[in-house]
Every structure is written in C-alpha cells, then in structure tokens.
Amino acid sequence: MSNPYKLPDGNVLISFSGGRTSGYMLYKILETNGELPERCKVVFANTGREMPETLDFVQRCSDEWGLEIIWLEYDRPNEKVSYKEVDFKSASRNGEPFELLINHKKGLPNVLVRFCTQELKIRTMKRYLVSHGWRNWHSCIGIRADESRRIKPDDNKERFKKWYPLFDAQVTKHTITSFWESHPFDLNLFAKNGQTAKGNCDGCFLKSEATLAMMWREHPDRMRWWANMEDSQPIRNNKKQVFNPTRTFSGLGDFVERQGDWIFDDEALLCQADDGECTGDL
C-alpha cells in the first residue's frame, strides 16, 4: 500500500491554514518526503484577522521544521487585483486585506456569498502560482476522515486536482490531538473536542453565536473590527448589510456586555450551531 503522504507527480501546493490539522498534515508530508522539492510550495494566505497565536504558530513551524512557508495577502495596487508576499514581521494584523476587499466589493460577504474565502485565500494563492509559471498542480487539502462531508470532487475547469492525504490516511481529530499533546510545541489556542474556536478569522461570521459571544467577552477589541465593518455599510433597499442575517456584531456585543458570565453556562441561551466551515484551501 502506498504512503498517503508521498508527494504526487508534478507541481504541488500545500495550503497551510495555520491550524493544528494542516500543521499535522505538513509534518507528515515532511516526514515522508524529507526536504521538499522546488515543485512543492507551502503557502499561508493571511487575511489580517488571524489571532496572533496563529501567526506565531506558522512561523514556529517554519523555523522548527526548516522549511520555507510563503506568506501571501490579497492586494489591489492601482485598483488591479493582485497579491503581495509578506512575512511574519510585515504581515497585516488589523484586517487590512479583508477591509480592502470589502471596500472594493462595496459590500460584505455573508453566509450565502462567501467571497472572502475565494478572494483572500483561494484566488490569492492561485494568482501567485500562475505568476510563477504554474499551469497545473495538485492542491493538498487538510480534510480529515471524520469530516468527509467537506470533500468535493475535482472541477475539470480548474487548473488543479485535489489531494486529501489526511482522509486517505484515515486521520481523525483524536489523531491530531494526540500528536500535538506530545509534540515539542503547539498552537497556543484552546481546543475543545478537536475544535479551535479562535482559529481562522477571529470573528468569522460562520462561527456559532456562542463562539462569537465568547470572543466578545474575551477579545472585544478584535470583535469591534467586525462591528465597524457592518456599521460602515450604507443602507440599501431599506436594509443594512450584515455578515449574518440572524444577528449583528454590534447587537451581540451589546448583549454580552449587558449580561454576566452566567450566559455561557446555559447552552440553550446562545445558539451553538455554526453556518458551515471556511474552506480556504486550494
């Protein structure tokens, strides 16, 4: 039986989200293949809304494992869509790429139209690869065996074919948790039942009401960015644009501020269901 982490032929993109699952996937690929060839690139697409611990973790993986991780951000020089290469020190930390996209679109992404993932991550990575002469490639995506619902068939219109080594290796949340518990370093964000509530964009509108309320309690300064983005939108057709039609960030923040911590003890008070997952892998 072939090793599920052995690099396929041709160009390979390893999309590194900065989370534990994609970090484990990257480690196993390095363990199997050794030093990665030039035809394989590891890319982290920064939206500017990642937690500081995520950025620290991406850099730590690069330093500890001795590999180059390419940091990219969405950009629009002279109003022409593009990307820019950054690093740990120069990476945006106040949502600048995300705000640039919102201003260009003159509107907000939402649970039905998730153009943030497409533009800030998927197309940004694609633009980088095409600009470096890549015509076709395999896209390594960190989807585990216990989340097979996220696996999508290849689109023949796209330049890339999807590669799911974690699924092929039958890796689960338990595998990931056990690995990082024994590893010399870890992502310094709390995880419960294999889920890192503060991972990806800090206030991602796909996260549950309960998670976003927790973020308001613990990181109000970071959540105000999301409220400001909503508050700055013009009223169209007598409606205010919001990220999620079931709530506003300001409204949730006001509710949390008025209540005591007891609201987090009653699971029936705040909705625990999320609106899907950010699939920012290419």
Image (tube, rainbow, N blue to C red):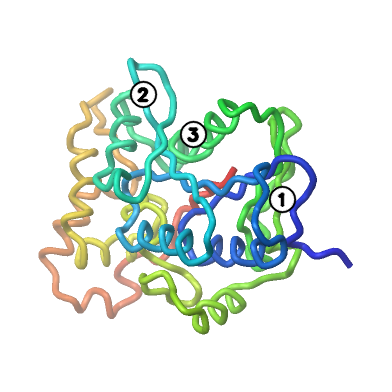
Mark 1 or 2, nearer chain start: 2
Mark 3 vs mark 1, CA separation in Å? 19 Å
Does 37 sit left or right of 53 as displayed? right
Which of the image's four quarters has the C terminus? top right
Q: Are marks 3 and 1 in contact (CB under 8 Å)?
A: no
Mark 3 vs mark 2, CA separation in Å? 11 Å
**Residue type highlighted by circle 2:** Arg
The residue indicated by pointer 3 is 124
Residue drawn where x is 71% and y is 60% of the image: 33
Does 70 sit left or right of 3 as displayed? left
- The tag on residue 76 is 2
Residue drawn where x is 21% and y is 46% of the image: 225
Q: Position of residue 250 (x, y in %)?
A: 18, 49
Mark 3 or 1, nearer chain start: 3
The residue indicated by pointer 1 is 163
Vertical order, 241 against 153 (above or below): above
**Residue type highlighted by circle 3:** Thr
Q: Quadrant of residue 159?
A: top right
**Secondary element at image label 3:** helix
Q: Nearer the viewer, residue 100 or 249?
A: 100
Residue drawn where x is 61% and y is 57% of the image: 142
**Secondary element at image label 1:** strand
Q: Are marks 3 and 2 in contact (CB under 8 Å)?
A: no
Q: Position of residue 76 (x, y in %)?
A: 36, 23
Q: Are marks 1 and 2 in contact (CB under 8 Å)?
A: no
Q: Position of residue 262 (x, y in %)?
A: 20, 79
Q: Quadrant of residue 257?
A: bottom left
Instruction: Give the class, few, some or many, for how many residues have Cα within 10 Å of label 3's Cα (few <14, many ≥20).
Output: many
Residue drawn where x is 35% and y is 45% of the image: 244
- The tag on residue 14 is none
